[in-house]
């Protein structure tokens, strides 16, 4: 097809090249082949292990404990020659602690983790600061890693895919069958008239015959193609602009944001904190009411009104009792309502979990939305190591940046009243549990409320993601927002920082 199009635009006979194939030992394009005389010269295992150590200790893997365990396991098994253990079910059992009879179709943890590791490896290998002669890759469709040697090859000398060959004057045949294998001299170098191409038996060297020959002129059918090509180009261009418009719409962005949860086999878990609350005991209320008979009209009023003790009054610790069935704070409730509405609009099933009801085992099997941060132990653990994290410093809790400018955001107060708070939105394609994870949290409940409000705003969320060119299918990201507090109410959220990895 390409050859016919090329001929149609050439008014004079076109020079063609004959491709002679020289077979070498199989290896991926762009990397050092095995030494001549050896079919497959493997890389020394100690070199591979050294490179593995550099990879899992790099910044590209610092936030993924699961990714490190997965990559360590598959590389160890490949080096040890245990290829039979590189199966999805066995990886799920040995790395992720699944039962031997677990249903891989319903539990995609291995596939999800493999995709995350591939993305991290791609980021690692493209990092200009990484200087290494060895590449560790996990090809699509397989969990068995490959180990490759880098090689300096000009981009125009590396061709991907197969090539159609021109007529060979010695055999009078066309196509790849005219390629003739021959031996390669060990001292021969890749000349300007040679290229590298992936063949069925591995990477092969093609030599270009510099003797031009006349090529047959296009047939009468070429007129149809000449008319069809502009029309096809117009249709393709229109389709491109249409898809670009759709992909930039707020509705599509919101759908892409929640896509991992919408395709999951289990409902997404909305996990809310259950803080410990203390209240005056009934005995203390009775004592106060004896001295002030008209203080509370009913016993229910004790739940709705503040006990008006004087600052100089003293009480015993026994006069305060914990409330076991108290719910989350106002900010967490508002955030849960906003996110529940979002998920309902997207047609995504969800379940609520409070406090200890949300177990780590549950979060390994289902996508998760975590509301709150500092007052939830497992929330802090699951998002540790990200670009932005919460600090529980006594008296001055804050959000701080772990790298780069090391910025810090703290609550602002005036006479003990909060006047500005900060919230954090975190989205991970594959968190430490191996599942899709979203966290909406603030330093106080004002920040939590503001963060959920920003997440629910399709337009503002889309503007930030598109301004930073964040690919929702490949990238994790965090957004720090601020909100001004007026008369005890959080104002509109404003973006102050964005991080991606």
Image (tube, rainbow, N blue to C red):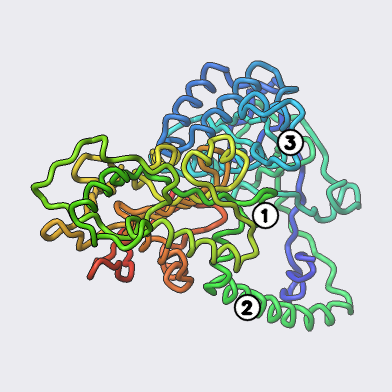
Label 3 residue SS: strand
Residue 238 location, quadrant: bottom right
Circles 3 and 2 in contact, beta carbons < 8 Å: no
Name which residue lies at 20% across and 59% down.
Answer: 418
User: Label 1 belongs to which residue?
Assistant: 263
Where is residue 459 drawn, in percent x and y?
A: 46, 74
371 to 434, vertically: above or below: below
Where is residue 1 drawn, in percent x and y?
A: 80, 66
Name which residue lies at 69% across and 23% down.
Answer: 40
Q: Is residue 433 left or right of residue 275?
A: right
User: Label 3 belongs to which residue?
Assistant: 202
Residue 245 location, quadrant: bottom right
Q: Is residue 420 left or right of residue 12?
A: left
- The residues bearing labels 1 and 3 have C-alpha atoms spaced at a distance of 37 Å
The disc, 3 or 2, on the residue closer to the chain's N-terminal end is: 3
Q: Is residue 390 left or right of residue 51?
A: left
Local packing at callout 3 (Cα closer than 10 Å; few below 14, some 14-19, many 20+) is some
Label 2 residue SS: helix
User: Label 2 belongs to which residue?
Assistant: 242
Where is residue 493 drawn, in percent x and y?
A: 33, 67
- The residues bearing labels 3 and 2 have C-alpha atoms spaced at a distance of 40 Å
Local packing at callout 1 (Cα closer than 10 Å; few below 14, some 14-19, many 20+) is few
The disc, 1 or 2, on the residue closer to the chain's N-terminal end is: 2
| Residue mark closest to the camera, 3 vs 2 | 2
Label 1 residue SS: loop
Name which residue lies at 64% across and 39% down.
Answer: 109
């Amino acid at each position: 097809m390409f050859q016919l199009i090329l001929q149609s635009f050439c008014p004079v006979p076109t020079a063609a090249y004959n491709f002679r194939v020289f077979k070498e030992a199989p290896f991926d394009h762009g990397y050092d082949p095995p030494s001549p005389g050896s079919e497959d010269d493997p890389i020394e295992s100690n070199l591979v292990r050294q490179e593995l150590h550099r990879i899992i200790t790099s910044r590209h893997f610092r936030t993924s404990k699961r990714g490190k365990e997965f990559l360590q396991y598959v590389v160890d098994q490949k080096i040890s020659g245990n290829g039979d253990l590189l199966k999805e079910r066995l990886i799920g059992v040995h790395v992720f602690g699944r039962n031997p009879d677990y249903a891989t179709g319903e539990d995609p943890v291995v596939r999800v983790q493999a995709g995350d590791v591939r993305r991290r490896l791609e980021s690692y290998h493209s990092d200009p600061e990484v200087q290494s002669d060895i590449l560790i890759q996990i090809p699509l469709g397989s969990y068995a890693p490959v180990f490759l040697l880098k090689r300096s090859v000009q981009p125009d000398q590396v061709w991907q895919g197969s090539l159609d060959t021109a007529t060979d004057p010695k055999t009078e045949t066309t196509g790849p069958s005219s390629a003739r294998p021959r031996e390669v001299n060990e001292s021969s170098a890749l000349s300007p008239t040679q290229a590298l191409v992936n063949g069925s038996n591995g990477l092969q060297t093609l030599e270009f015959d510099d003797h031009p020959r006349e090529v047959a002129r296009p047939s009468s059918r070429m007129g149809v193609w000449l008319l069809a090509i502009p029309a096809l180009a117009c249709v393709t261009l229109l389709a491109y602009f249409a898809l670009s418009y759709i992909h930039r719409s707020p509705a599509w962005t919101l759908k892409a944001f929640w896509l991992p949860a919408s395709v999951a086999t289990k409902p997404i878990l909305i996990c809310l904190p259950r803080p410990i609350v203390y209240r005056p005991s009934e005995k203390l209320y009775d004592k106060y009411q004896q001295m002030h008979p008209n203080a509370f009209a009913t016993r229910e009023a004790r739940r709705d009104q503040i006990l008006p003790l004087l600052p100089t009054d003293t009480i015993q610790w026994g006069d305060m009792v914990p409330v076991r069935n108290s719910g989350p704070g106002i900010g967490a409730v508002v955030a849960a309502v906003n996110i529940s509405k979002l998920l309902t609009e997207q047609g995504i099933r969800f379940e609520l979990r409070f406090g200890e009801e949300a177990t780590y085992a549950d979060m390994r099997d289902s996508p998760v939305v975590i509301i709150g941060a500092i007052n939830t132990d497992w929330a802090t653990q699951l998002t540790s190591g990200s670009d932005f994290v919460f600090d529980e410093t006594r008296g001055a809790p804050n959000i701080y940046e772990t790298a780069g400018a090391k910025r810090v955001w703290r609550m602002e107060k005036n006479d003990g009243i909060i006047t500005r708070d900060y919230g954090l939105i975190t989205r991970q394609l594959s968190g430490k549990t191996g599942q899709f994870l979203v966290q909406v949290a603030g330093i106080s409940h004002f920040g939590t409320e503001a963060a959920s409000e920003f997440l629910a705003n399709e337009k503002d969320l889309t503007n930030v993601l598109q301004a930073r060119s964040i690919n929702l299918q490949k990238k994790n990201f965090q957004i720090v927002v601020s909100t001004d507090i007026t008369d005890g109410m959080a104002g509109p959220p404003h973006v102050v920082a964005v991080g991606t990895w």
